[in-house]
Amino acid sequence: MKILIVDDELTLLEQLKSALEGQRYMVETARDGEEASDRLFDNPFDLIILDIMLPKQDGLSVLREIRRAGIKTPVLMLTARGDIGDRIKGLDLGADDYLAKPFSLDELLARIRALFRRSGGQVDSVLRVGDLQLDTISREVTKGGASVELTAREFSILEFLLYNKNRAVSRFSLAEHVWGDAFDPFSMSNFMDVHIKNLRHKIGDSGHGAIVRTLRGVGYIIKDDAQ
């Protein structure tokens, strides 16, 4: 399950990202409203954790923009304690829940679980293409019913491509997701090629019906021909 956290407090952002990844959620972050909007219109998410007080574009404006665009992803708003006015505005604009700062991690996790339950089962932890399946909760991968053993980075690559199924993913976006700030495009330029090659070998991916396809000069795509 993929979560976007939007907050300009870097320490809090890093703490939440680490904690949620420890719960096996897939997490991306943004530090201002404009960056959040760009990410939300570029990639699908299962949940948005959105602070109201943000630089460049406040959280309420981001919420209004995505709801007008028909994006129905559940939104958990982060508000200042006692600021009832912002909570009411957020709920009126389509927020699904709110949490006042400061909050405990246990409460945040409980709210997230409740929002996923409330989604009516629309969020599926299993990502599929053909006979390849990846479970984002158990982190199990199967191909034709047989288990496939992947390294952590191979799993992250496959998971990210499956989340963006039928969408082109640039090499840089994929590298940024897998290695984060540790990725150096000059000294690590061949890392992606090696991991993609190993991933393809493990899932038996070759020939005309290849699952992970290379887009020359762009990056990669998983194309679901059944859709």
Image (cartoon, rainbow, N blue to C red):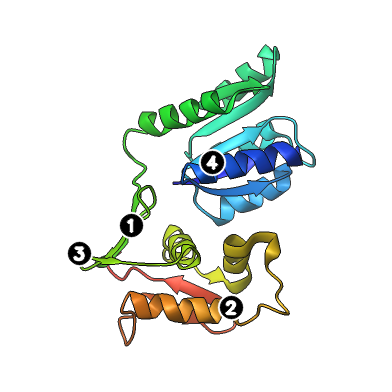
* CA–CA distance in space, label 1 to label 4: 19 Å
Circle 3 Cα neighbour tier, 10 Å, few/some/many (<14 / 14–19 / ≥20): few
User: What is the C-alpha distance between the residues marked 2 and 4?
Assistant: 26 Å
The Cα atoms of the two marked residues, 1 and 2, are separated by: 23 Å
Give the amino acid type for the residue marked by disc 4 in the picture. Leu
Query: Distance from label 3 to label 4 (Cα)?
Result: 29 Å
Q: Give the number of the disc on residue 140.
A: 1
For marks 3 and 4, the one nearer the N-term is 4
Mark 4 surroundings within 10 Å by alpha-carbon count, few (fewer than 14), some (14 through 19), many (20 or more): some
Circles 3, 4 touching at the beta carbon (< 8 Å): no
User: What kind of element bears circle 1?
Assistant: loop
**Mark 2 sits on what residue?**
191
Q: Secondary structure at mark 2?
A: helix
The reply to whether discs 1 and 2 touch (Cβ–Cβ < 8 Å) is no
Of the two numbered discs 1 and 4 on the same chain, state the one appearing first in sequence. 4
Does residue 13 appear left or right of residue 45 in this picture? Answer: right
Of callouts 3 and 1, which one flags the residue occurring earlier in the amino acid sequence?
1
Residue 145 badge: 3
Q: In terms of depth relative to the viewer, which is nearer, 55 or 9? A: 9
Q: Is residue 221 left or right of residue 29?
A: left
Percent position of residue 164, x then y: 46, 61
* Residue 148 is at least partly visible in this image: yes
| Residue at left offset 34%, top offset 46% | 124
Q: Residue furthest bottom?
A: 207
Question: Upstream in the sequence, badge 2 or badge 4?
Answer: 4
- In this rendering, would 178 be left or right of 84? left
Instruction: Farthest residue to the left: give it.
Output: 145
Tag 1–tag 4 contact (CB < 8 Å):
no
Q: Check residue 20 in the rendering and tell me which mark sits there, or answer none.
A: 4
Question: Which quadrant would residue 64 be assigned to in this image?
Answer: top right
Q: Secondary structure at mark 3?
A: loop
Residue 94 can be seen, yes or no:
no
